[in-house]
Image (spheres, rainbow, N blue to C red):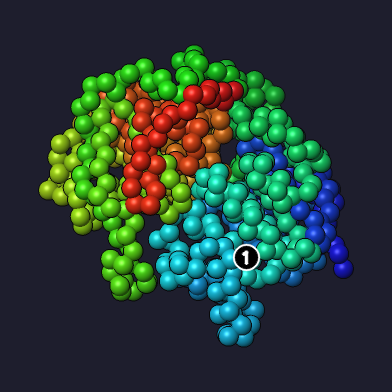
Amino acid sequence: MDLLVQLKHVGFRYRGAKLPILKDVHLTLRRGDRILLRGRSGSGKSTLLAILSGLAPEYVGGTLSGAREIFYRRRGVVLQNPEAQVVTPTVEEEVAFALENQGKDPGWIRNRVRETLEALGIAHLAERHPLSLSGGECQRVSLAAALAMDPEVLFLDEPTSYLDEVSSQRFFEALDLLHPDTALVVVEHRLQAASRVCRRSYRVEEDGSLHESDFTPERQESEGRGSEGRAARRQESGVQESEGRGSEGQKSAGRQSKGWESGRQKPAVRGKMPLVGEPAYGGVGGSLVPVLEISGLSHRWPLDRKGGQKGSTELFHDLHLTVSAGEVVALLGPSGAGKTTLLGKISGRLPVEKGRVFIQGKDIATLSKEAFYPLFMLVPQNPEHMFLAETVREELVAGAAELSKELGGGLPKLGYGPSTIEEVAKRFGLSHRLQAHPFRLSEGEKRRLNLAVAFAVRRPLYLLDEPTYGLDDEAKALLREDLRSLVEEGAGVLLVTHDRAFAEVTADTVYTLKEGQLVREEKHAYVYCPA
């Protein structure tokens, strides 16, 4: 039988939402189909993929209406956040896990795991714990686990969110390993990469309906702009992407707001993006007072999960780096190069075994926790690693209260103006999500919540790991304005990113970490126009 999934008049309403996120959706998936799901952030793409893959409503929480028939037996799923899928202590066990559950022969499983890891170029990671890998490496492990199953249909939800352009292309090239009869459903913003494997394209529209669309780059490019702000204006939205759609009155009210909720309206402070090659913030970093100094920093990873063969794999060697007050420094590099590890050493999450790290002239190895942590703010790669509370409101209150201790208590005054939780939420496009659990937000909302907490009070140094994760171009431009506020008051910023365009228009200096060394990049002259 060629039919794998059939949807007729399907709608979906998240728990607690008044209006549906999807309605009257018709879609047929057959063997060999290769489908791209498109649409603005918060439109319902991931919800539709969850319905097709059987994850909704069983594991999502909500009400499915209409008729859904699923005929496949074996499915593979790769989620946007790869850490959410990790269940075993090593990469090879992760890839073998589903095969063992299918009762396959142990010898056959070993061969299948080895072949799959080699085909994806990650055989050298076999003994590593998946959670010790970079985000991009972890995404490739998730793909390996899915491919090893020889699924009838493979579902990919923004599978290259932690990958640079080159790695993204290689990821999609790996899909050549799929059997011609294997169906593929992809949610992806990188049209050029996805068009390599997808033959049909569907767009989730503003009203929750689904229509077949074309692959024109112009239309795809426009889909990423202004979408987070628009999604944030949906006052009746609910779990995950945006649960339902607000009334016209609510949308109209949203257009009058400023900041991350303003949608396609340009905030008064933003102005024109500079040509790369100009100082990113008008020469603010000219004071050259070091806020971060790294001298002779090196790092080695053990190979096996028990910590044996310590020091056998050198990740980077003898790094030297300075970030001055009022300066933004961006760090690029391929997945697994050590960018997140470097931030881990600066922030004290990993020990400094060789070399020295100074923040505001103080050797961090000599500082107590009480003296160390007020010197910097870390926004981790995985947004969920920063959450502490049960609701967005509690997260903002707890985060602001914790960060304001050194100010003598009370809610800190934000550098960009608002001083109440409601105003903070409005600024970051989270007004309608104050009662939601942080883990039930969309990926873009999770990242915006991170940034709202991180920017609640001034710190000398900000360490941002993939700060544009989950953000569209409009939200990136607003993030850039918040960074402007930080550096104009003398903070230093070190950001790690795969988004080269954002790095080149945002940073005063750009480095690439590759093969264990830092290389200063020449900034290319082009204009970044997000809206």
Say above or below: 90 vs 380: below
Residue at screen point 64% across, 53% down: 172
Q: At which x and y percent is residue 57?
A: 68, 56
Quarter of the image for residue 114 reads: bottom right
* Location of residue 279 by image quarter: top left
Q: In this orientation, does residue 484 appear?
A: yes
Q: Nearer the viewer, residue 241 or 507?
A: 507
Determine the residue positioned at 68% across, 51% down: 186
The residue type indicated by label 1 comes to Ala
Q: Is residue 230 left or right of residue 418?
A: right
In the image, taking residue 5 as reference, residue 441 lies left or right, namely: left
Q: Residues within 10 Å of mark 1 (few under 14, many from 20)?
A: many
Residue found at x 53% / y 22%: 527
Residue 98, percent from left and from top: 60, 73
**Front-lying residue, 510 or 413:** 510
Res. 436 visible in picture: no
Judged left or right of residue 528, residue 213 is right
Q: Position of residue 325 (x, y in %)?
A: 25, 27
- In the shown orientation, is residue 331 left or right of residue 97? left
| Image x and y of residue 410, in percent | 28, 31
Find numbered disc 1 in the image and state the secondary structure of the residue it sits on.
helix
Q: Quadrant of the N terminus?
A: bottom right
Q: Which residue is mark 1?
A: 146
How many numbered circles does the render carry?
Answer: 1
Whether 74 is drawn above or below 39: the answer is below
Looking at the picture, tell me which residue is in the foreground, 425 or 82. 82
Q: Residue at x 34, y 52 (%)?
A: 516
